[in-house]
Amino acid sequence: MYLVDTNIFLEALLRQERAGEVESFFQSIDLDTIFMTDFSVYSIGIALFRVKNFTIFTRFVEDMIVDGISILSLTPEDLKTLNQTTQKFNLDFDDVYQYAVAEKYDLQIVSFDKDFDLTERGRKEPIDVLKGASN
């Protein structure tokens, strides 16, 4: 089961350099095994609205969230512990939020963000997951 970081979604939505890899990942992995945070949904909305891609955001919600990806969040009690984790691993707020959700729900982080490499959970890139799925 995977927690997909914001940057993975944005890579495909904004047609960036590794969009093909991300699309292969989503086509090959059962959406029921993929999770994202509420923070990621809002971050994607902010990024897409900033560049006036309103339709892409709506399509993203319809295609990915309505059809399978579950959204996870932290409780206020969980939020109170973020400062300990961020100090331990030197993570920004967005990364520590993702990390805490992955910890809470025991999910593998899928991200292009190398900051997760410094944590106990680490991370995988989409290509790593695809290679593991084909073995």
Image (cartoon, rainbow, N blue to C red):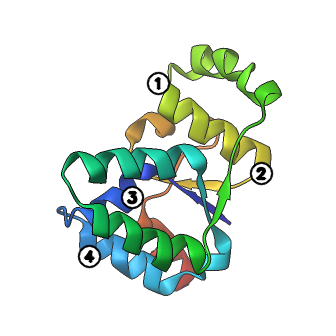
- Identify which residue is drawn at 58% across, 41% down: 98
Residue 18 placed where, x, y %?
24, 65
- Residue at numbered disc 4: 20
Contact, CB < 8 Å: mark 4 with mark 1? no
- Identify which residue is drawn at 60% across, 70% down: 69
Asked whether, in this view, residue 123 is left or right of residue 69, the answer is left
Quick one: label 4, few (<14), some, or many (20+) residues within 10 Å?
Answer: few
Quick one: label 3, few (<14), some, or many (20+) residues within 10 Å?
Answer: many
The span from disc 4 to disc 2 (Cα, nearest Å) is 28 Å
- Identify which residue is drawn at 23% across, 60% down: 53
The answer to which quarter of the image holds residue 27 is bottom left
Quick one: label 1, few (<14), some, or many (20+) residues within 10 Å?
Answer: few
Asked whether, in this view, residue 19 is left or right of residue 121, the answer is left
Q: Is residue 46 visible?
A: yes
Quick one: label 2, few (<14), some, or many (20+) residues within 10 Å?
Answer: few
Asked whether, in this view, residue 10 is left or right of residue 64, the answer is left
Q: Which mark is residue 8?
A: 3
Label 1 amino acid?
A: Asp
Asked whether, in this view, residue 132 is left or right of residue 70, the answer is left
Q: Secondary structure at mark 2?
A: helix
